Amino acid sequence: MPAIIRKAAEHRERIAIDDEGLSYTYGDLLEASRDLASELLSDQDDLRCRCVAFMVDPGFGYVSVQWAIWRAGGICVPLCLTHPLPSLTYVLEDTRAEIIVVSPRFESLLGDHALSNKLRLIVLGREGLVQADTLPDVGAERDAMILYTSGTTSKPKGVVLTHENLEAQITTLTEAWGWSAMDHIVNVLPLHHIHGIVNVVSCSLWNGATLTFLRQFSADRLFDIFLEGRVNVFMAVPTIYFKLIAHWKLLPADRQAEIHDALSAFRLMVCGSAALPVSVMEDWRRISGHTLLERYGMTEIGMAISNPLDGERMAGAVGLPLPGVSVRLVDESGGEVAAGEPGEIQVKGRNVFKCYLNRPEATEEAFAPGGWFRTGDMAVLEETPGH
């Protein structure tokens, strides 16, 4: 059984998800995911790492599907909700997905593809009543999820992550960012990327926290949620913070003050996935009282480097290696560079992905001797007092 499922059993009565005004406990998640896992298995005892693609609206249903795939022994392949059919078809064909799970509104988009390729299509809300006596034993070494790179210079590559990889990514952030069951976070991020699916969804649910889903981004609605006083953790990309800042500046002074007071009570605010302009960081500090925590990560490694939860956060810097993650900067010949000299970021640890799907040559090229993953990103190590 995946560790995140075992941990959920420790919090059965706690609220796991707030979705469209409805609240669901961890017990609800366990029950729903077990039922769907039985449906996925049908007359089999184990999916044995076969790929299950899913195109599901963010919310309780999304997490139920993800957990069900894992509990049935399958590999999760989350599809982007805004991609056109050719992009979706590329992922389906590359992963050789045998089952597709969709929210009803996506049935018309993927139904013909499933029919013509003889794939099994499950529409949420129309599942059968199959009940498996037992679910398979899924070990940490098994493949768990395939996420796709952006593909800016070539076709997107499928990044294969094992349950062990995901557990390492989640536990290092739990330690570094102080996650606990007392936390409450709202998700506004897409769930086919590591930022949303691991940093927000998986970290919160691993720790027994509460997760609110905002399906459509709205600055005004998000501020309303903040003003309710329940949410104390927030993670977003720079463009979202920019939109929130722009909207806040248009509000009456009394509402601005209310929002400032609500935000100042938050425990943690994180920004990532792109460089944070200093002007945005400074504006948000004035609005919220928080210096955003910047971090560095990518699909292949999850998060590797982070500014501190406690202590000074430096604008334009991504911080220090996270617990259990080794990081080095190297020159073109592979030698480590001195402080102040630019070098390529290379990463090693249990958080680093297993391989690129069906691309052994690309996988081999991605690693330097000693198992160091070549990120391709350049950085400079700055000496700071105490480090």
Image: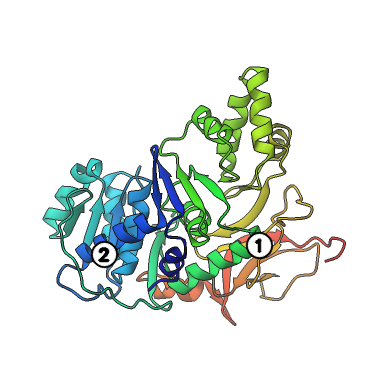
Q: CA separation, marks 1 and 2?
A: 33 Å
In this view, the residue in front, 113 or 237, is: 237
Q: Which residue is mark 2?
A: 37
- Does any portion of residue 354 appear in the rendered image? no
- Residue type at tag 2: Ala
The disc at residue 254 is none
In the image, residue 220 above or below residue 143: above
From the top left corner, tell me how far across and down residue 145 is, in percent: 39, 65
Q: How many marks?
A: 2
Q: Tell me, yes or no, whether the two marked residues, 1 and 2, touch with CB atoms within 8 Å.
A: no
Q: Residues within 10 Å of mark 1 (few under 14, many from 20)?
A: some
Q: Residue at x 73, y 74 (%)?
A: 336
Is 239 left, or right, of 121 in this rendering? right
From the top left corner, tell me how far across and down residue 34 is, in percent: 29, 63
- Residue type at tag 1: Ala
In this view, the residue in front, 380 or 302, is: 302
Q: Residue at x 62, y 57 (%)?
A: 296
Image quadrant of residue 8? bottom left
In the image, residue 90 above or below residue 275: below
Q: How is the image coloured?
A: rainbow
Image quadrant of residue 251? top right
* Quarter occupied by the N terminus: bottom left
Q: Which residue is mark 1?
A: 176
Secondary element at tag 2: helix
Image quadrant of residue 297? bottom right
From the top left corner, tell me how far across and down residue 91 is, in percent: 31, 57
